[in-house]
Image: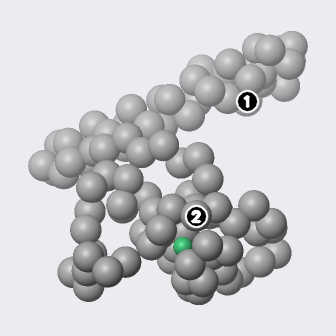
Amino acid sequence: MDVQGLIQSGTKRRRLRLHDSSFSELRAVLEWQFRKRGKQVLPVPSYNTSRECFLCGGINKGLTLEDRVFLCPRCGFTVDRDLNASLVLLKRVGWVPPFWCACG
Ligand SMILES: [Zn+2]
């Protein structure tokens, strides 16, 4: 199927749907590959992962793409923004880091 051709010739609404279908096909293939290898696939909402503090859940609304370091306005937690986003994703699927304590 010439998905790229359909995307270029379609209306804006069709283009958006085709982009979504391409993404859903990619997701289906990835899920199939992971399950085939006995790996667990967990859907995770990605909303605000870059802006949410891994430790306290505070939101840094002023964080821009140029900011490479996350600074929590609530608790002061400071870490690389990509690492923070990764930790937020892991936290959303229920992962608890080994260094976790009840104080934080
Ligand atoms: Zn925080």
Q: Amino acid at mark 2?
A: Gly
Q: Secondary structure at mark 2?
A: loop
Quadrant location of the N terminus in the rendered image: top right
Q: Is residue 64 above or below residue 9?
A: below
Q: Residue at x 37, y 41 (%)?
A: 43
Q: Is residue 66 above or below residue 26?
A: below
Q: Secondary structure at mark 1?
A: helix
Which of the pair 60/93 is nearer the observer? 60
Q: Residue at x 67, y 22 (%)?
A: 18
Disc 1 + disc 2, Cβ < 8 Å = no
Q: Residue at x 76, y 68 (%)?
A: 63
- Which residue is denoted by mark 2 in the rendering? 58
Q: Nearer the viewer, mark 1 or mark 2?
A: 2
Q: Amino acid at mark 1?
A: Gln
Q: Residue at x 27, y 55 (%)?
A: 94
- Taking the image as four quarters, which one is ligand 1 found in? bottom right
- Which residue is denoted by mark 1 in the rendering? 4
Q: Is residue 27 above or below residue 99?
A: above
Q: Position of residue 39 (x, y in %)?
A: 19, 51
Q: Quadrant of residue 73?
A: bottom right
Q: Position of residue 24 (x, y in %)?
A: 50, 29
- Mark earlier in primary sequence (1, 2): 1
Q: Is mark 1 within 8 Å of ligand 1?
A: no
Q: Which mark is residue 59?
A: none
Give left or right: position of 100 versus 6: left
Q: Position of residue 69 (x, y in %)?
A: 67, 83
Number of other residues with Cα within 10 Å of mark 2, as a class: few under 14, some 14 to 19, many 20 or more: some
Which colouring convention does the figure follow? one colour
**One can see residue 42 in this view:** yes
Quadrant location of the C terminus in the rendered image: bottom left
